Image (cartoon, rainbow, N blue to C red):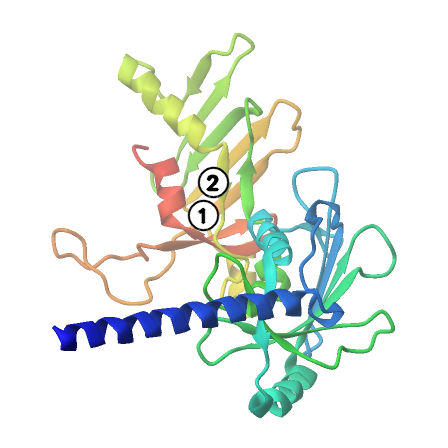
Amino acid sequence: MNKNLRLFYILLLVTATAAGLRYYEGQNSAEIQSYDSAAFAVADTASVDRIFIADKDGNSVLIERTTGRYWTLNGKYFARKDAVDLLLKTMLRARVKSPVAKAELENVNRLLAGRAKKVEIYQGGEEPVKTWYIGTSTQNHTGTYMVLGKADESIAEEPFVVHMEGFTGFLSTRFFTEEREWRYTGVFDYPGEELKRVEIEVHGAKPRTYQIAVNDEAQLMVEGAQLDSRMDTMFWQNKFNLFRKVHLETYNNHLTPEGQDSLINLAKPAFTLTAWSAEQVEPNSIDLFWKSPTSDTYDDNGNLNEWDGARMYAVYKNEAVLVQRFVFDPLLQGL
């Protein structure tokens, strides 16, 4: 009985000590957030209109808000909405997790000076409201070494370990500077009732063209095939709806310059997909090409697959890109 009572008191003491440490850390963290050198968060991300990111290798991207649905990238492309939204969320919820330990301070400062990414955040003015310098992750990958820039373009003296509330991991990978990775990947983007006509061209030994359109009475019209039954009508309606939102995978096609030139100017596509809105004179169009597999795969009958089962090459607006068959196969199946 005495032994059990003694164990109870030990556990009670450990629990109280842990609670006290958590309270102290919480109080300490709250106190740190009040320092000017630790004020990383941006309270009003709705007013952020420009984000500039640069790395030490000379790469940079400028992302600017527009009146439309998408931000612009370097003044010439649309930027990926998911990546922009992630940056804004990070800016809103960034919090200091802890100061940098004294034993690590010299090394962290050296890394920040040598490899940090610079992030300038603007809210309508010519000068950034905040400048972040983002370094590497901590050893346990639950925080990121960061330091704030000052108004006089100098750097705050003390770096911090920063994290995002509600997220376990590091933040540096969100602030990338590769233009191709930032580019909006939408091929067909027709919200609501904007989509009016699509065309599917099957090339090869037995070429065929299918057209699906909505007429002025909102009826679905199909050319190149017959609507013989209710099932056929549903098939073509579903096919038409799939074109409302279609994305390529990446502009990083992994081809050599010679390979890109050959794909764009010499190769014959397997399929061509085209879509129009009611206002479009020039449609959106993408050519699809079979891609050799990176490794041997087999079909259900044990036969060697001739083509890559995951990806295809494509040419979109005269650029060679990669697309996922998971996205594009449903547009072609049954044809």
Left or right: where does residue 301 sit relative to residue 189? Answer: left
Q: Name the residue under label 1.
A: 288
- Mark 2 residue type: Thr
Q: Residue furthest front?
A: 2
Query: Could you say which quadrant of the image residue 297 lies in?
Result: bottom left
Give the quarter of the image for residue 146. Answer: bottom right
Residue at point 47%, 11% (across, down): 219
User: In the rendering, at what x and y percent does residue 138 appear?
Assistant: 51, 78
Residue sitting nearer the eye, 62 or 239: 62
Point 31% across, 56% down: residue: 307
Q: What element carries label 1?
A: strand
**The disc labelled 1 sits on which kind of residue?**
Leu
Q: Which of 192 and 107 is in front in this view?
A: 107
x and y percentages locating residue 281 in the rendered image: 66, 28
Q: Do the residues labelled 2 and 1 touch (CB within 8 Å)?
A: yes
Residue carrying label 2? 272
- Mark 2 Cα shell of 10 Å, populated few (<14), some (14-19), many (≥20): some
